[in-house]
Amino acid sequence: MSSVIPLTIISLSVIASIAAVILFFVARKFKVFEDPRIDEVQEILPAANCGGCGFAGCRNFAEALVKADSFEGLVCPVGGAKIMEEAAALLGKEAPVVDPLVAVLLCNGTPEFRPKTSNYTGVYDCRISHNLYAGESDCSYGCLEYADCVRACAFSALYMDPETRLPVVIDEKCVACGACVKACPRNIFELRKKAKKDRKIYVACSNCDKGGPARRACKVACIGCGKCVKVCQFDAITLENNLAYIDATKCTFCRKCAPECPTNSILEINFPPRKQKIEAEPAQTTEN
């Protein structure tokens, strides 16, 4: 009986040694080499892990930068051009020039223009509300007002205006991570090219209904009349599904489109006031 315990200990020791040797060779055979430059690139990145780059986090993005042949299509919206240039210099690659973007809300349906026609008593969540019914107004395309976008923003670049009941983007804080775009079930957020002095011209509407129903649902809805398309000399405006769209990459800010819009659905942001036209006084005739 006394020899059983030492024999058991010896047997287990031998088995453990054999298992350790096997595991050692298996680990050597299936060893995954990780480029040390991944850690170096990750240290450069802002560590926001917002997913705006299209990857799960900064670590995954750093790995993609190291493995990529070029930086084409790869950009860190939080770090911007400066961070991408640093990463490119570290990896001996060239960082493409990417225009900065900013989130824009394609809806101007305030209570003044889009009156309530029903009351919602469910969970105050945009996605849930969107899946249940059209909304508290007759516009089934506009903002639902339950702030999913605000909660999704990790940079405090959004807040709900208590008067307009619409989300407001703070341009100085927006990093164009796209979290609001993903969070909105109505797809009324867009990342647009950021211009100097934060100037913007865009159609603040997403209603694809025909003119009559769209206008009855919201007084500032785009009615698809096409007047803005005709007056644009730069092919920056298109009309599709009864809705006009201004391409920020083509728009030259000539500002000819906004006065043509009969419903004032085209917004001009951060521009100086338009000069008032002074009508010429009729010439006075003198009698001899």
Image: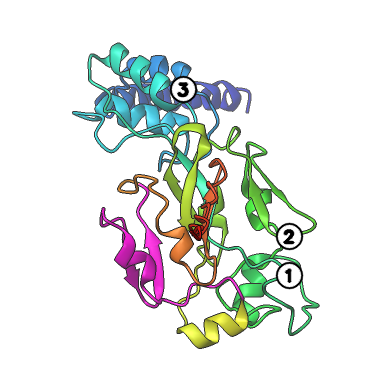
Q: Secondary structure at mark 1?
A: loop
Residue 224 in the image, given as x and y percentages of width and height: 41, 76
Residues rendered magenta in the picture: 219-248
Residue 234 is covered by the magenta coloring: yes
Graded by Cα atoms within 10 Å as few (under 14), some (14 to 19) or many (20 or more), the crowding at tag 3 reads: many
Q: Horizontally, is 228 left or right of 46 in the view?
A: left
Residue under the point 23% across and 20% down: 94
* Image location of residue 211, percent across then percent down: 47, 83
Q: Is residue 282 above or below residue 62?
A: below
Amino acid, disc 2? Thr
Do residues under tags 1 and 2 come within 8 Å of each other at their CB atoms?
yes
- Residue identifier under label 3: 45
Amino acid type for the residue under numbered disc 3: Leu
Most extreme residue toward the bottom is 212
Please state which of residues 267 and 137 is positioned toward the viewer in this rendering: 267
Q: Residue at x 30, y 48 (%)?
A: 250
Q: Residue furthest left?
A: 69
Residue 32 visible in the snapshot = no
Q: Which mark is residue 54?
A: none
| Badge 1 amino acid | Pro
Q: Which residue is mark 2?
A: 164
**Disc 3 or 1, which lies upstream in sequence?**
3
Query: Which residue is disc 1 drawn over?
Result: 111
Q: Is residue 102 magenta?
A: no
Is residue 287 visible in this depiction of the protein?
Answer: yes
How packed mark 2 is, by other alpha carbons closer than 10 Å (few <14, some 14-19, many 20 or more), is some
Q: Position of residue 28 (x, y in %)?
A: 28, 22
In the rendered view, tell whether residue 132 sits above or below residue 177: below
Mark 1 or mark 2: name the one nearer the start of the chain: 1
Q: What residue appears at the point 33 percent right and 32 percent down from the top-left corner? A: 98
The residue at 56%/81% (across/down) is 215
How far is mark 3 from mark 2, CA to CA? 37 Å
